[in-house]
Amino acid sequence: MAKTYRKLFLFVGTVTLLAVSSIYFSKPVLAVPLPIATQQSVLAEASAYGLAALYPDGLVTNFASSVTLDKKGTASIVEKITVYFPQQRHGIYRWIPNEVIIKDTGKKLKQPISVSSVSYKKLPSTADSVGSLSGGPAYTSSTSSGNYTVLKIGEADTLISGAYEYTIAYTMKRAVRFQKGYQELYLNITGDQWEIPILKASAVVSPATGIADSKCFTGASGATASNCTINTSGNYFSLATATAPTVLAEGLTVAIKYADNTFAPPSALERFIEQILPLLPLLLPVFVFLYGYSTWKKYGRDTPLYAVPPVFVPTNQMEQENLTILNGLLVMKGTPVATTAELIRLAEKGYLTISYENGKVSLRLSPEQQKKLPEFLATQPKSLQTLISTLTQDFQPDTAISSLKSVYTDIANANKQAVAEFKNCTYITDKSENIQSAFIAFSVISFIGAFLLFAFLSESSINNWAILPISLLICGVFFTVFAIGMLKRNKEGDQLYLDLHGLKKYIKTAEVKRLEFFNNPKKMIAHFEQILPYAVILKLDKQWTKEFGPILEQLEYAPTWMTSNVPIYQALPHTYAAMSNQISTSMAKIGTPPSSSGSSFGGGGGGFSGGGSGGGGGGSW
């Protein structure tokens, strides 16, 4: 019996819905808000008699838009969208275009969207009173996606069903177009990209004064059907109402032709400012570049070398200085190559032994070498102290240093200390060092500001100012580049720099000088070893070793500071590369964790649904 009543109830309900739909959609309907009870009855019918089953994601039972134009043609739009959810959903999407392509010219017209408020409320059942409505601000994410402002209304951890009314208020700049001899509002009211159907749509546009003609269109984008009516009442509003439901990807568009001078077109100055204002942030990187270049030219540009005399032996200043500092004068940073050179110099002085076997480098300390270290260590820079301490901590005589787990990590730390020591050395001007620190701070601020602005703009959907964070990023890059090159050598630094290049010049042309030592093998070997650490930082170690290779082979060169299972003169070039690569690898491991629109009234005639400004679409989620 219950099944019989249910079938009878469904049949009567279906017939009633068809009758109501036939009566409703057969004649124009004024755009006045429907009583809540009427809205609820539509929702109840949609749910009970079949439409809800066709669209389980939801359907828009009423889309009512109020459009108010100010004297400058900016539209203040309030959309009231009534949605029925047959099944549980979180809420709705609404996406609104920020620009439109003018069909006649192909140009893009920017129409910035500024959302002022979003709210929603659950509509009561038929038995509820009007006062029982619950509402308020909605949880909304507003993002910019391409040329759209996208609103995601609802809460991710809350599911809803039934009838809800969503209210979206926003402004659209340049909604009115200023054509030759007339002015026009060409507005896609609902948008034609909805993923759920719209049963009823209407729009109220004001002012109505000065209207010369008006049209409305319905259907998919490009359609010319006019299943809609337009009424003008007094001097207050113009009304467009769809007389048939729109299905998926269909909408309502209105085109209103106003008499010329109804709205005040922007002045030439306003148009100029409007075009230039979004580009103003581009001036910031230009200013930063000019400022950075002029500052570098005045305080950071090193004295050029016009004549470099050769230097045949390291000067006293070179011998006393940390090799990483010398390398810093050449490349303005400490590198693993400088640390390698220091280890070679330590080995030559007898503080450690380098072993090269089967492509691997080991550093060894004998008991005698361990005894010599404390006194020597007290006179060395912090970076070299860290390096030597690394080689001696928990160390047993003749133990391969490569077997210590932390040795290369500590060498990397020593190298970082050397970089800091270079910035504080006596060869750099204080002014350039202070400016470099300031530029580094400015670059960090620029990058952080760009990141924060990107996050802010993605929430506010202000596409016109997206160029600002890009400009800040460029500023950050400029500050970084100028900071890298800002350190300037003082007079003492220039002299040491000149001597290093003089030594480099000699190493490249050492053939003639080498012949002078031919009859004194011991002096030749001493000269070779004295130059070797500097050849490493000058990246001429292979050339230096190659030049002396035949003589080293002839003399059966076997220094006390290095051992190898192959001849030393053959092992030396490979030793430099292997040591540098091992240190570079250790540094790289630091911090590594485990594994288109035209005019409706132009000469071409026509107009169509989906044309004009506004539009977009929506759906549920």
Image (cartoon, rainbow, N blue to C red):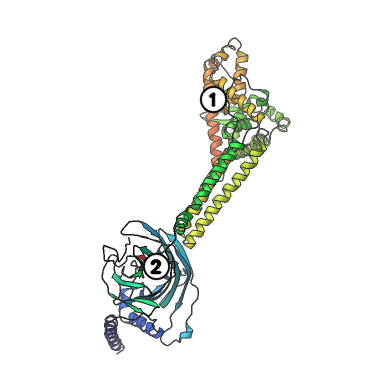
- Disc 1 marks a residue whose amino acid type is Leu
- Identify the residue under disc 1: 540
Closer to us: 204 or 262: 262
- Give residue 220's quadrant in the image: bottom left
Percent coordinates x, y for residue 335 in the rendering: 57, 35
Whether 306 is drawn above or below 160: the answer is above
* Viewer-closest of 243 and 101: 101
Instruction: Say which quarter of the image contains residue 152.
Output: bottom left
Q: Residues within 10 Å of mark 1 (few under 14, many from 20)?
A: some
Secondary structure of residue under mark 2: loop
> Is 382 or 465 nearer to us in this picture?
465
What number of labels is visible?
A: 2
Q: Quadrant of the N terminus?
A: bottom left
The amino acid type of the residue labelled 2 equals Asn
> On the image, which quarter does residue 575 sit in?
top right
Mark 2 crowd level (few <14, some 14–19, many ≥20, 10 Å Cα): few
Residue beneath disc 2:
261
The kind of secondary structure element at disc 1 is loop
- Please give the name of the residue rendered at 54% of the width and 18% of the height, measured from the top-left corner: 509
Q: For the residues marked 1 and 2, what is the alpha-carbon distance in whole angstroms? A: 79 Å
Up the image or down, 453 lies above or below 573; here it is: below
Above or below residue 426? Residue 527 is above
Q: Is residue 436 visible?
A: yes
- At horizontal 65% and vertical 42% (from top left) the residue drawn is 434
- In primary-sequence order, the first of circles 1 and 2 is 2
Quarter containing the C terminus: bottom left
The x and y percentages for residue 443 are: 57, 47
